[in-house]
Amino acid sequence: MKRIARSFGFAFVIVGRLLASNVTLAQFDWLPSWNDGPVKQAIIKFVQTTTDSKNAQFVPPEQRIATFDQDGTLWVEHPIYTQVVFCLDRVPAVVKQKPELANVEPFKTVLSGDREAMSKLSTEDLLKIVAATLTGMTVEQFQNEVRTWVATAKDPRWKRPYTELTYLPMQELLKYLRANGYKTYIVTGGGQDFVRVYSQQVYGIPPEQVVGSAGATKFGYDKSGKPILIKEPKLLLNDDHAGKPEGIHLMIGRRPYAAVGNSTGDQQMLEYTHAGDGLRLAMIVLHNDAEREYAYGPAQGLPNTKVGTFTQSLYDEAKKNGWIVISMKDDWKQIFSKQ
Amino acid sequence: MKRIARSFGFAFVIVGRLLASNVTLAQFDWLPSWNDGPVKQAIIKFVQTTTDSKNAQFVPPEQRIATFDQDGTLWVEHPIYTQVVFCLDRVPAVVKQKPELANVEPFKTVLSGDREAMSKLSTEDLLKIVAATLTGMTVEQFQNEVRTWVATAKDPRWKRPYTELTYLPMQELLKYLRANGYKTYIVTGGGQDFVRVYSQQVYGIPPEQVVGSAGATKFGYDKSGKPILIKEPKLLLNDDHAGKPEGIHLMIGRRPYAAVGNSTGDQQMLEYTHAGDGLRLAMIVLHNDAEREYAYGPAQGLPNTKVGTFTQSLYDEAKKNGWIVISMKDDWKQIFSKQ
């Protein structure tokens, strides 16, 4: 009974504060880092409409699913995806365990530390590095490695942990949606096992609500007979482009009511979300703020990029379909969750 | 504010009743259909221990995951898996759309209605039927077909909808675990898309908490340009035997604290669950009640079966490991959720 009494006490404090401050839940500003304007208003209208039981476009709580891309949507993806940095950083440890790799490409180049040469590695080379650094260990060993790396690695430009480079406006949006009964998911082209390690701590999203590119695991027993799962170099789900709605169906089984992305890899997720009945929210972040973060497209004449490409045709599709284009420069008062 | 006020009112009624009746939450019997005895006591001890914050074996709420096999664990699987009946029932509609199949095996045999001949169909034949009846349509078309079938089809022995042939003691266990912060999942060798259609209504388990054998879908556009997902005849996850812990890792990403099954297909899930740190609950149902349900093993001298095989070696492993063997005959006062 004690715990119940305690929850009641806490709830009373909240209710008391709201009454005292004369602010209702509807008036509370959940999105203080968003500049006032059509984008912020569209988000609020979406949430108020779909949670108003008297509205024809009301969405029952259990159907309230919102999916967010991660790289470039929830946190920084330039100049190189965070998980790729992790893989490169892991190479010395892998070579230590398998010394024969030291003189074999692409490991030799990575060990040299020559950033210029590393930036020219082919996709095939990168896949070799991915296979060597993300597979061949138990899922717990991998989780421990990621946990340690995430706690210590720092972004070279901001000299801060990558986990502090999440976008404050998106963190507010996640909380706003959850406060209104939405289940928030990450749907990422990045590795599902990688993101799941820190998703709760960084975004308040539990591991089971992370959908990402996923490799197979193999059940077996270790030398002492203990059951283990070994990460295998076999891709089960390439959760990018068409793989995003396919991954959403596989892992969630419901069409989202809201989806947010920032690149061509998110196009099909946004299309799939937007094609559902009733009111849907499809949003896409335009990185047009080189000073506070990065600027890339090539939509709207922004510099071209291979990391998080946002083409002009995707921009045109967004405008034509009534998706919301978020201008990082104009819509966000503050970029990062920790200044 | 109105909704908050209403929830508070409701909570007060509950608390008031508990105080008035002098019954505390801990004393309330969540498992009235379970006979008193070591099995029921072990369940209660597991729940009380893992939810007691002062206990060394306390499990934080976010880690409380419980996984349940479906066929033979939550509902009847004999003499034939319910989903197989669905597939066979769908054959006439499939042949109507593709008349050329009428004279091709195994469709010809199924159309003949000859139960004896049907029971002799090979695995290869069944896979052809599965592919023809479970793939080639949009996910929404499939969901509608399952919804219609589930609402009308009846079990021939009890002459009642299959959804009324769930086990009352298991329904109570699901509710008891959920009332104690456990997230309940179905982890089934059956089709994930099939079970997800009725899991909320039948078990109170939302579709995103159903892990099952899953086929690929293919994202595309229909003639009007609308995005669609088509079910493909390509297996992504064979969620049985070793595939169960592998599927749990893929879809949930956490090791369960409790797992319940009834056959060799659940062995690896139980091993994986039981191998975790702290207190874990691994349970396995023995179908030894031919009168009220069915009796099959071949463990403990029960008749052999191909549907839900429970071997003697699995029984011995359960006893050796301290898993709980549930005797349907002795532990359950009532079998079905609707009498």
Image: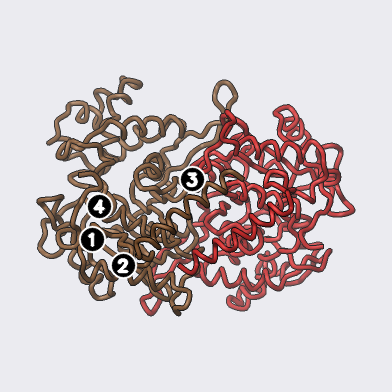
Chain colours: A red, B brown
Tell me the distance, in whole angstroms, between the alpha carbons under discs 1 and 2.
Answer: 10 Å
Nearer the N terminus, badge 2 or badge 4? 2
Q: Is residue B285 visible?
A: yes
Number of numbered discs overlaid on the protein picture? 4
Which one is in front, A66 or B180? Answer: B180
> Do marks 3 and 2 both belong to one polypeptide chain?
no
Q: Chain of mark 3?
A: A
The quadrant in which the C terminus of chain B is found is: top left
Query: Looking at the image, which residue is at 79% across and 51% down?
Result: A33
- Where is residue B51 drawn, in percent x and y? 43, 69
Q: Which residue is mark 4?
A: B72
Tell me the distance, in whole angstroms, between the alpha carbons under discs 1 and 4.
Answer: 17 Å
Which mark is on residue B43? 2
Nearer the N terminus, badge 1 or badge 2? 1
- SS label for mark 2: helix
- Where is residue B270 drawn, in percent x and y? 33, 65
- SS label for mark 4: loop
Residue type beneath disc 2 = Ile
Q: Which residue is mark 1?
A: B34
Which one is in front, A91 or A182? Answer: A182
Which one is in front, B181 or A264? Answer: B181
Residue type beneath disc 4 = Gly
Residue type beneath disc 3 = Leu
Q: Given this view, does label 1 or label 3 mark the residue nearer the observer?
A: 1
Q: In the visual, does B115 lie left or right of B337?
A: left
Q: Given this view, does label 2 or label 4 mark the residue nearer the observer?
A: 2
Query: Looking at the image, which residue is at 26% across and 47% down?
Result: B166
Tell me the distance, in whole angstroms, between the alpha carbons under discs 3 and 2.
Answer: 32 Å
Which mark is on residue A250? 3
> Do marks 3 and 4 both belong to one polypeptide chain?
no
